[in-house]
Image (tube, rainbow, N blue to C red):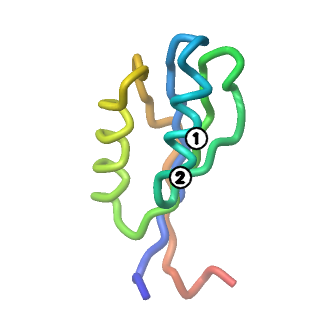
């Protein structure tokens, strides 16, 4: 079990005509949730990772996806894993 849990949110920008495909790809990624914004091409994403390094790694991976114009970290929070009940 990891010592920490990192919760982050991102806004992923894509052209509206590519947003559904981008959102589908994001939903298939481990620890990634899509919360809305697909119709406008501004996809709201949550990440749950074990380390800060994984946040950066996942953000970089998302930025390089076909159809993604930009991905921006909006929020990052971490806490000890045992505090989550």
> Could you tell me which quadrant the C terminus lies in?
bottom right
Viewer-nearest residue: 57 or 83: 57
Q: Position of residue 75 (x, y in %)?
A: 53, 43
Q: Residue at x 52, y 37 (%)?
A: 10
Residue 72 is situated, as x and y percent measured from the top left of the image, at 44, 30
| CA distance for labels 2 and 1 | 7 Å
Up/down of 37 relative to 1, above or below: above
Count the labels in the image. Answer: 2
Which of the marked residues, 2 or 1, is nearer the chain's N terminus?
2
Q: Pointer 2 and pointer 1: residues touching (CB < 8 Å)?
A: yes
- Residue 19 position, x and y percent, is 58, 22
- Mark 1 highlights which residue? 45
* Residue density around tag 2, few if under 14, some if 14–19, many if 20 or more, within 10 Å: some
Observer-nearest residue: 38 or 9? 38
The residue wearing badge 2 is: 32
What residue is rendered at 55% in x and 43% in y? 9
Q: Which residue is found at the position 62% from the left and 26% from the top?
A: 20
Secondary-structure class at tag 2: strand
Name the residue nearer the viewer: 80 or 39: 39
Res 23 → quadrant: top right
């Amino acid at each position: 079990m990891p010592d920490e849990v990192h919760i982050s949110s991102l806004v992923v920008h894509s052209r509206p005509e590519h947003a559904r495909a981008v959102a589908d790809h994001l939903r298939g990624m481990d620890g990634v949730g899509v919360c809305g914004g697909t119709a406008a091409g501004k996809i709201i994403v949550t990440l749950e990772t074990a380390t800060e390094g994984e946040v950066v790694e996942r953000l970089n991976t998302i930025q390089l996806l076909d159809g993604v114009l930009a991905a921006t970290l909006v929020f990052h929070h971490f806490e000890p894993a045992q505090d989550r009940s």
